[in-house]
Amino acid sequence: MEFSNTPSFFHHGPSPVARLAISVTLSLALLVGDSQFGLMERSREGLSVALYPLQQAVNLPVSAARHVGDFFVRQAELKTENDELKNRQLALAAQIVRLQAAERDLNELKKTNQLRISRNDQGQIAEVLYTGRDPFSHKIIIDKGEDAGLSTGQPVLDEAGLIGQVTRVQPLSAEVTLVTDKHQMVPVMIQRTGVRAILYGYGGGVEVRYLPPAADIKPGDLLQTSGIDGLYPAGLPVAKVTAVERGSGASFARITSTPLGGIDHGRFVLALPVRTVPAAVQPASAPATATPPPG
Amino acid sequence: MSLDHPQELLKPVNLRLIYLSFALAITAELIPLPVGSTRWMPDFVGLLLIYWAINQPRLVGVGTGFTIGLIADIATAGLFGQHALAYSISCYLAQMRQRQLVMFNLGQQSLVVLALLLTNQIIMVLARMATGAAFVGWHYFLPPLIGALLWPLLTKVLLAPYRQKH
């Protein structure tokens, strides 16, 4: 209200110009002090502490509104998020399966390696490449052959027991006839009694033939290699007796057993060297003429 | 008391409403708003100061501008003295022409308010640039425009408590 050209009836303190000058001077002083010396930092800190509750109070409705907004998220958003998560879960599941497989392989490999180390003869660890194409002959192909010094007749086992025998050697791979093949025979010994017998494969399983009905054998007996053929080292576990039928009319007991080695699973096997190599001994298996050479 | 409503007889203004309006405006400064809203949000404190400086020159003047400016500095955590300088200058300018401004209609007042708010922004930009900040861009001058557009509404709202009930 006060202007220089208007008469002043009441005293109102300093004129606006003076007030402006004071304010501007103070402001400029504050500006310079703040920017150059940071003198106000501490005072501002104190003031912001005082301001904090107010700020919180002001924030309260906003954050509450945000919470409410979160509650009413659009259905489409949830749907897309859900789809995304599902996809990711699928990918992760696939990854886990692969990981599990890798872990299983690793464990198996470790065990096989341990088996190799524990034996003082020089074994060869090999990986199973594929099974034979002919469903009637039980054969697998391993990834070691002439290059690794394999020869026919070598017993092949895994950490659980005997699997079969190398029957054909190719430059980079070898064919292993499993104990379940119908041409495959393994001389075994009942571990409990020491009775010797021959374990015949019959295409899908193994059985002990030509034991008299009175033979001392019962389910659960362990059959291991007897080692008298000069081919298999003695004491390799081969199979476990599962059932013994002593038919009164039959001249032999019917003894079924299951092989212990992983003949239909597992990826790593150990090929043992032939214990002695007498020239006369042929591989127990007949040449697999029915099977075209795989690979 | 706005003289653009000569037909109305208004109740006397009390200081409490002025304080309350400033408190509300400064509280509004503290509300966390989405990023980018500062580009168009008008400076309510500056707008209120100009309103009261025009309509209540006895109660609100340069000193009030300076004090409120200091509080705004703290509230916005800007540079100390930047708002104080701008507000005291704009309050002085408003007070200088107060007798003409109260006779203006709302449209003319809006133009003056636009000029005053732009002055505010210019002073603040200069203060920041003098202390070493880079120029923020021309969008910094958008809020005064919106503030000037809001001026008629603000006038109506702030006059409401003083209308006599018939």
Image: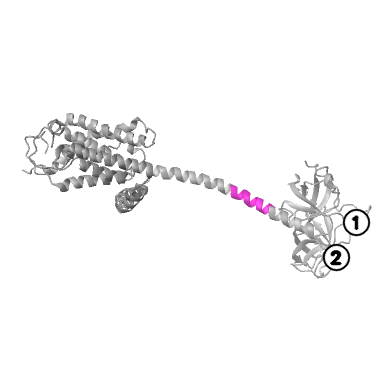
Q: Is residue B95 left or right of residue B80?
A: left
Number of labelled discs?
2
Question: Can residue A138 be seen?
Answer: no
- Amino acid type at circle 1 is Thr
Question: Up-down: is A196 above or below B49?
Answer: below
Question: Up-down: is B38 above or below A188?
Answer: above
Residue at image location 30% in from the left, 43% down from the top? B73
Residue at image location 29% in from the left, 34% down from the top? B123
Residue at image location 38% in from the left, 44% down from the top? A37
Q: Quadrant of residue B65?
A: top left
- Residue under pointer 1: A276
Residue at image location 41% in from the left, 43% down from the top? A77
Magenta range is: A95-105
Between A157 and A186, which is closer to the camera in this rendering? A157
- Residue under pointer 2: A196
- In the rendering, at what x and y percent does residue A285 appear? 85, 51
- In the rendering, at what x and y percent does residue B142 appear? 30, 32
Q: Is residue B79 left or right of residue A202?
A: left
Q: Is residue A71 left or right of residue A83?
A: left
